[in-house]
Amino acid sequence: MIRAITGFLVAVVLLATPVWAQRAADPMLIRAAVLRVDAQTLRPISRLELPTADLGFAGARLAIEDNDTTGRFMGQDFEAQEVATGPDGANAALDSLIGAGIAFIVVLADDQTTLALADRAGDRATILNARARGDALRGADCRANIIHVAPSHAMIADALAQFLMWKNWPRWFLVEGSHPADTDLADAYRRAASKFGAKIVETRVYEDTGGARRTDSGHVQVQKQMPVFTQRAPAYDVMIAADDSDVFAPYLPYQTWDPRPVAGSVGLVPRTWHPAMEAWGASQFQNRFEELAGRPMREVDYQTWLALRMIGEAATRTGSADPAVLRDFLLSDRFEVAGFKGQKLTIRDWDQQLRQPILLTTGDLMASVSPQGQYLHQVSQLDTLGIDRPETECSF
Amino acid sequence: MRYLPTLVLCLAAAPAMANRVFVTNEKSNDVTVLDSDTQEVIGTYPVGNRPRGITISPDGTKLYVCASDDDLVRVFDPETMEELYTLPSGPDPELFVLHPSGNPLYIANEDDNLVTVIDTQTRKVLAEIPVGVEPEGMGVSPDGRVVINTSETTNMAHFIDTESFQIFANVLVDSRPRFAEYNRDGTKLYVSAEIGGTVSVIDPSTQQIIDKIGFEIPGVLPEAIQPVGVRVTDDGSRVFVALGPANRVAVIDGKSDEVRDYLLVGQRVWQMAFTPDQKYLFTTNGNSNDVSIIDVAREKVVKSIPVGQQPWGVVIAPGPH
């Protein structure tokens, strides 16, 4: 607490004083790392989604450029080490980063790995979760040393649910995958349905039996299997695909037995970023990224950029490079950051989840943004997305 | 229909000077020209790709338009709307400000973290000044000695000496600063912050924030209140702030920095310009594709006029046409 107050005072003094261009010769160094844990998985169904070697890291490079440009005026210099490893090497990579004195580690990994790394780091480092979306990680399994930059399953499910209710499409046919992450996502849609008054009229599990993905005759099989899989459903307005594992969802549009739209993991997709987004000054941001990376920006790039920008913002506002000062500022009610979403993004104190609008995107465009205008909240409209304070299972 | 202009004249009470009003339409790539007296559209003219910032020389003979997607500034004859020549602006010019003498022109290059200084006579680049990330707002002190640039992602107002082209101070303000405007006697500098939702009042002599203006509108979500354009009356008594998707212009007391009123205008109100007699303030409303006209003395919105697609910037000719 005393540390928090000190941080606050420092910030106030800085705000009241003009920041001069000419600073002390040695800029203060703010260090972070991006640790990407690449699990062994099948290649994605669509080759457009193939991972790139610089996935996430490209977002980090842009964030460091942005932070350094500001840092020139503050006498601050930023760096982010990039480490990609398989699951077996994750612990050693984390130890080595912490051993090198890095106290902020952006982790790009699944839920289980993120949790394990956070527990291993303990009070030696703050983990910025920029990929894992599981609700348990923010609920029963929450940890005080994780800040969640990636949105939760509950947030993206609520974002889609609000839009579907605005459309007056309350009857859902939920198709969920057979892996635990798919179940977690499907649970989020079940929760969203009861929260916003939709009715799940049918649920089916699409078993992952292996199968021939992306073979020469794959489309023939898909064209026959998907109508059969989706036939004889009660009357519904929209099909929701909960396919976190990328097993079946891309096969669904136009192949359903009934002529119905598909949303969720495919079709109208709730997400943090889309390369066609140009609202709120995003055009310049997209341009900067594409110039640097030579490809469009993906969600993981955006989330990594945002995580490092949060550290940059804390350093700018506090004028400090001390990890404890930065961490306290990030978790204080004074923290806010702009992320090309048309409003400030802040952190929920009950589970350390970043509040953020969620884009609803079709293939080529952003179709809408949630929260939808009609859903109000006594604290922040953004808290209509995800787990609110009274519902949280998190206690630090 | 012939009685309409007469009716407007009567409403305006005293005979007003007729000035040309120029509105850039970001999405339809043209400028709508209006008559400030009849308050009707004179014509619409193509001006290049993605026109945003717009200004006019003090003698009213040259109209400057930031053609953002053409990476240059196009210069027009305000009477004929013929293109005279172009100026090298650097990439993605968004907003600019003219020195009070009419030369040079200071341009924010949003994609390149630069402010480019252009001699409007020789049409040469005088300087490129590195600033923060996504430079946007540009203001100039009444004596012409200081140019202000705001950088949207760095969140600073950079004070630039117009003699040396050096930054001599940086003031940290709230998130996404969009616009910088001095009052006429140079005692206050107003910097709007779109995401922060505030206007910082800065003492230019000490470069300190002396006040921070917040906004609260019953029935409007706080997230929708996004201050962008700022204009100050010549006597400094009132400050008008465009609040973006809140669809309102705030009227602020220039002495106490207190909000006096909120005026309902079109959707996503962005930039504003006074008529030279300061009787009217024109606002661009990007999402409703129109301009609103505010009667400055009465603090009332008196008319809205449809223009092109996504109106962005506005400037009014200094003399009658």
Image (tube, coloured by chain):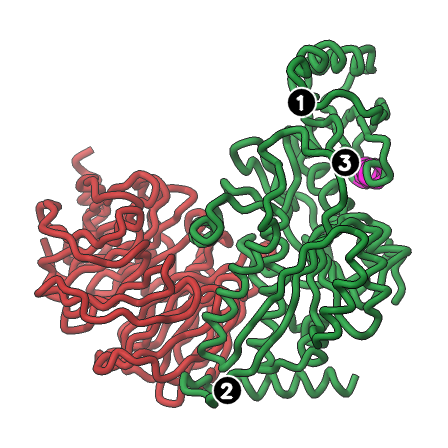
Q: Secondary structure at mark 3?
A: loop
**Residues indicated by labels 1 and 3 sit on the same polypeptide chain:** yes
Q: Nearer the viewer, mark 1 or mark 3?
A: 1
Q: Can you tell which mark lies on residue B152?
A: none
Amino acid type for the residue under numbered disc 2: Asp
Chain in green? Answer: A
For the residues beneath circles 2 and 3, the answer to whether they share a chain is: yes
Relative side of A340 to A378, left or right: left
Give the CA separation, mark 2 to mark 3: 47 Å
Which of the two discs, 2 and 3, labels the residue nearer the N terminus?
A: 2
User: Which chain contains the residue that carries disc 2?
Assistant: A
Could you tell whether B187 is left or right of A383 in the image? left
Asked whether A290 falls inside the magenta stretch, the response is no
The residue drawn where x is 62% and y is 57% is A304
Q: Chief secondary structure of the magenta span? A: helix
Which residue does the numbered mark 3 point to in the structure image?
A245
- Residue B203 versus residue B87: which sits nearer the camera? B87
Residue B63 visible at all: yes
Considering the image in quadrants, where does the N terminus of chain A appear?
A: bottom right
- Dot 1 corresponds to which residue? A214
Q: Quadrant of residue A380?
A: bottom right
The chain that hosts pointer 3 is A
Instruction: Identify the image quadrant of residue B252.
Output: bottom left
